[in-house]
Image: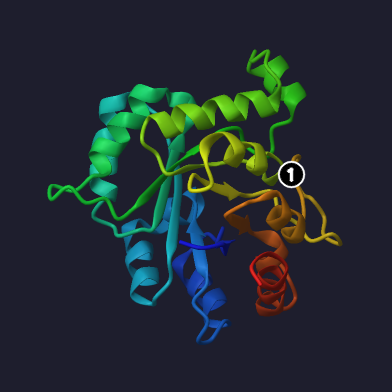
Amino acid sequence: MGKDVIIACDFESKAKTLAFLDRFGELRPFVKIGMELYYAEGPSIVSELKARGHKVFLDLKLHDIPNTVKCAMAVLSSFGVDICNLHASGTSNMMRAAIEGLTRPDGSRPTKLIAVTQLTSTSEEMMQKELLISETLPNTVLHYAKNAKNSGLDGIVCSPLEAGIVHETCGSDFLTITPGVRFADSAVGDQVRVTTPARAKEIGSDYIVVGRPITAAEDPVAAYRRCVAEFVD
């Protein structure tokens, strides 16, 4: 997997998702399916997008006791998605169980597993006051990244601002998938820790996840191409 732009398809139905993606013609962008769309449509949306040739990041953020997550990952292993995720705060035991569940009987594991560190809507002040985590936000993200790597995961979700230090500590092959990306002339919405595609590339993000700046654009294809030009090319 090289650098890529992942479009967050945060739509409420398969019909709206496919109508949106039909606008891209022969392009087959990497797409993220989040909770809203997956809970509305179930596994069929994954099958449809894979059949159309899209790479899929299934963003369900599992977080439960280790055995429950292991069993859920065993189900997801049959979906053929390219990336799925869980919350790093579920502890190393949960992450190792997830790897076990995601690994197929023949020992293969085609799906990359990544861990969410701290949501890009969370500021350091919120984390410290509401979650009672007294460390700095970068130190917390880095600690979660180390736990994820030691548990056998392929990478983490973090803000682009933390991608560089994660690579310095965990290696260049440890993936950083970074939401919180906006064009310089875009509104930040409910995100707190944000940057531009060009800056995310400079810092070292492997993948950027972009939603509204593409999906809500007057010309989504042009917005996607702009993202690719700034981040990949």
Q: Is residue 36 left or right of residue 76?
A: right
- Circle 1 residues within 10 Å: few <14, some 14–19, many ≥20: few
Is disc 1 placed on a helix, strand or loop? loop
Q: Please say if 51 is above or below 40.
A: below
Q: Residue 202 appears in which quarter of the rendering?
A: bottom right
For residue 152, what is the image quadrant?
top left
Residue at label 1? 190
Along the viewing direction, whichever of 139 and 58 lies nearer the viewer: 139
Q: Which colour assignment does the render follow?
A: rainbow
- Residue 93's place in the image compared with 152, above or below, is above
Q: Residue 190 placed where, x, y %? A: 74, 44
Residue 187 visible? The answer is: yes
Placement of the N terminus among the 4 image quadrants: bottom left
Left or right position of 151 against 100: right
Residue 36, position in %: x, y?
50, 51
Q: Position of residue 49 (x, y in %)?
A: 40, 70
Percent x, y of residue 91: 42, 22
Task: Pick the quarter of the image with the C terminus.
Answer: bottom right
- Residue at 70 percent of width and 73 percent of height: 229
Q: Please state which amino acid type lies under the numbered disc 1.
A: Asp
Residue lying at 53% horizontally and 47% vertically, measured from the top left: 172
